[in-house]
Image (spheres, grey):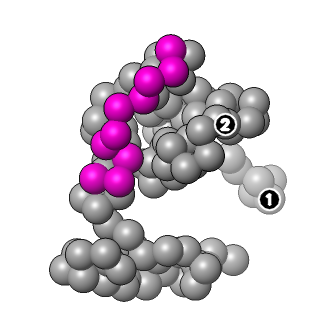
Amino acid sequence: MPRPRFKQRCAICKKNMVMMYSSRQFPICAECHMKRISDPVTEPPYQKLFDIPREFYEKSMFLRNIKEAYQRFGSLTPKQISAFKKAAKDMKNPKKEKEGEETDQGEE
């Protein structure tokens, strides 16, 4: 069963509303989050990793959280790196849902 969603004001700017999925989630709008992660990346392997279009970061809280974790701790785990690459790849090449194909289960 899906969890309820609700809106809450951004904890930093207090003017934008943020869609919340959990009570443990920190309410931060995309604008404030983008300001936080706007610092340049200096390490070459991570520079290449985080070199994706700004629109991807604006659309995906997951990508913003991974970049913020890198800036906080200075490195990422291999699982974080692979998840970031997969999410960025999925955003570059979105999967189109197959229209018109429905499974007819139980209709015999």
Residue type at mark 1? Gly
Q: Tag on residue 37?
A: none
How far apart, in angstroms, are the residues tagged by discs 2 and 1?
A: 47 Å
The residue drawn where x is 36% and y is 85% is 8
- Residue 50 falls in which quadrant of the image? top left
Quadrant showing the N terminus: bottom right
- Please say whether residue 36 is one of the residues in the magenta stretch: yes
Residue 76 numbered mark, or none: 2
Residue 5 is inside the magenta segment? no
Q: Residues within 10 Å of mark 1 (few under 14, many from 20)?
A: few
Q: Is residue 5 left or right of residue 40?
A: right
- Classified by dominant secondary structure, the portion drawn in magenta counts as loop
The x and y percentages for residue 108 are 80, 53
Q: Find disc 1 in the rendering and name its residue.
A: 106
Hey, which residue is sitting farthest left in the picture? 15
Counting from the top left corner in percent of width and height, residue 11 is at: 35, 80
Q: Is residue 97 left or right of residue 92?
A: right
94 versus 30 height, above or below: above
Near-viewer residue (72 or 77): 72
Circle 1 SS class: loop
Q: Residue 23: horizontal and vertical position, in percent?
A: 58, 84
Q: In this rendering, would 16 be left or right of 38? A: left
Q: Which residues, given as a range, are shown in magenta?
A: 35-44
